[in-house]
Amino acid sequence: MPDKSPQAAELISIPALLARNARKYGAQPAYREKEFGIWQCWTWIEAAEEIRALALGFLALGVEKGDYVAVIGRNRPALYWSMVAAQKVGAIPVPLYQDASAEEMAYVLEHCGARFAVCGDQEQVDKVIEVQETVHGIEHLLYLDPRGLRKYDHSRLHAMREVMTEGRAAQGRLEGELKAREAALGYDDTCVMLYTSGTTGKPKGVVLSNRNIIETSKASSEFDRLRAGDEVLAYLPMAWVGDFIFSIGQAYWNGFCVNCPESPETMYENLHEIAPTYFFAPPRYFEERLTILMIRMEDASRFKRWLFHTCLNFAKRVGPKILDGEPVSAWDRVRYRIGDILVYGPVRSRIGMSRVRVGYTAGEAIGPEIFEFYRALGVNLKQLYGQTEASVFITQQPDNEVRADTVGVPSPGVELRIAESGEVFYRSPGVFVEYYKNPDSTASTKDPDGWVATGDAGFIEESSGHLRIIDRAKDVGKMADGSLFAPKYVENKLKFYPNILEAVVFGSGRDKCCAFINIDLTAVGNWAERNNIAYGSYQELAQHPQVYAMVQEHVEEVNAGIAEDEMLSGCQIHRFLILHKELDADDGELTRTRKVRRGLIAEKYDDLVTALYDGSGEIYTETEVTYEDGRKGKIRATLEIRDVAVVGADEPKMAAE
């Protein structure tokens, strides 16, 4: 069982938890990484030794207390070690998104004033070198993977292994300094700085203390009874607060093992091999896995399809009840057990969830049918609601109180209140210290009493105490007739369909709502193949008449659902178009966590928005795009605009009326 006293002197920092784990769980696995097809393993004792050597190496390089150390790369044990090693010497780790452009990295590196950068490979080293024309604070770069770097100037470029070797060699000289710095770490000292996604402007540096991370990790771990024997797969961006909590905060508090996939491309295979007991993924992940499964079932034999759908229909009725401990007849339990042997168990194993004891999703609303599917299989999938500023956890769904339409009850230690405007506020031990170098934003987000404005509108159900989120508070507006406009609510309903990847709804201050749609190339591409529809590109498939008809059907189904909600019935979509390109973070249309930059999209595609509202049947457009290698280009297309049936209207309203 985890320790119960985080205020104890030995448990007031991540390095202190590391020392405790080396003593208590010494021979148990702390990290695994698949490399060259083989799983490598480090125990807690071995991980502590690697981190100590790197911390000594940092001291040898001149890392000072209070320095900022940028960490850039995919999930690898050595990069997690670099963050803890930085903490041991009193420095502050600043993980960056590995898929960020050099320009995006330049802002963060300059803003935090990083003197050191730890890079995973040549690609990340090249980005940092590129931005040094404008960012002059970087004094030393460390790299993990040496491939491609042999002929670089190594006067300020160091292999991480060599730094660790130098650290071990300097142990006699620097051990006393290292112990002194680690002993000086306080509960309210900075643990990490994480940058927000920047949906409406430049990213902000969120300063989180040891108290924030440890108290949140303790409370959330006790909520779900996490333990040292749990396993997680660390595949989410290291710059995201969720990964920091799961892979460092909770991992170090409980002493469980963090598994790093061989590469992003092998993540699904590695998930299947590890079969974690504790798992988080955004809703889109669960949607994609379900889509792939259903596509495969279409190619299965008639008997297998019959068996799958028969068992699944039964599981939807019984599975969630068994998970929630509700009464189920003995005969139904026997039937479910048979189905588990024949269908549910093999499916869970195939998607890497055969051992998931606690599974979470967050970030967007998840479709009720998707939620129902996984829980029917016996996967304890729940929802949480959180923010970087909260050290993740604001609300969580308790076992036996799991629903698709709420985000749960306040996490332990969290207080909630709803302002008159409908905005959700919270207060907790996890509340961030400040926005770095941004006192105005700090003051506008967190009041003197510690209450933080989430920026989301919602309400707390009186009967259950569960929180329901409606939309982003800044996006909630009024239609021209005064009815409520909540675009995210509508967008989420559209994205419940596997064929729709993204949606952007417009309508604030207008007489009707219209939408941009992005199709999901994988799902629609497979549908096209099954229906003998030939296409050569995303653009060609997106503009195919049958694809438009399918999307129109989805939009009209969403309209029918929205019409049943008296408060939001005015948000029905009257016209839509399918975009000729996928919205992309490299083009600035999405954040690195795939949040829509609504204002930028409206400005960038102003001609398309105008066409949606002026009654046009089609619109020619040219759009600049950024390719993977950084080159710029243009996509030209003529887009169809369709009218949609609206419930409660005699016929689709035209903008020209």
Image (cartoon, rainbow, N blue to C red):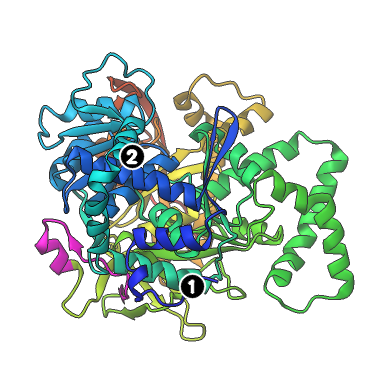
- Find the magenta span and give its range: 423-444
Most foreground residue, 75 or 494: 75
The amino acid marked with disc number 2 is: Arg
Q: Residues within 10 Å of mark 1 (few under 14, many from 20)?
A: many
Q: Is residue 298 above or below residue 93?
A: above
Q: Position of residue 543 (x, y in %)?
A: 47, 29
Residue 426 colored magenta? yes
Q: In this view, does 346 lie to the left or right of 241?
A: right
The N terminus: image quadrant: bottom right
Q: Position of residue 301 (x, y in %)?
A: 84, 36
Q: Residue at x 33, y 21 (%)?
A: 629
Residue 408 - label? 1
From this viewpoint, which residue is outermost toward the front?
A: 172
Residue 565 - label? none
Q: Distance between the residues labelled 2 and 1?
A: 48 Å
Helix, strand or loop status at disc 2: helix
Q: In this view, does 646 lie above or below 6?
A: above
According to the image, label 2 marks what residue? 168
- Residue 195 visible at all: no
Q: Name the N-terminal-most of marks 2 and 1.
A: 2
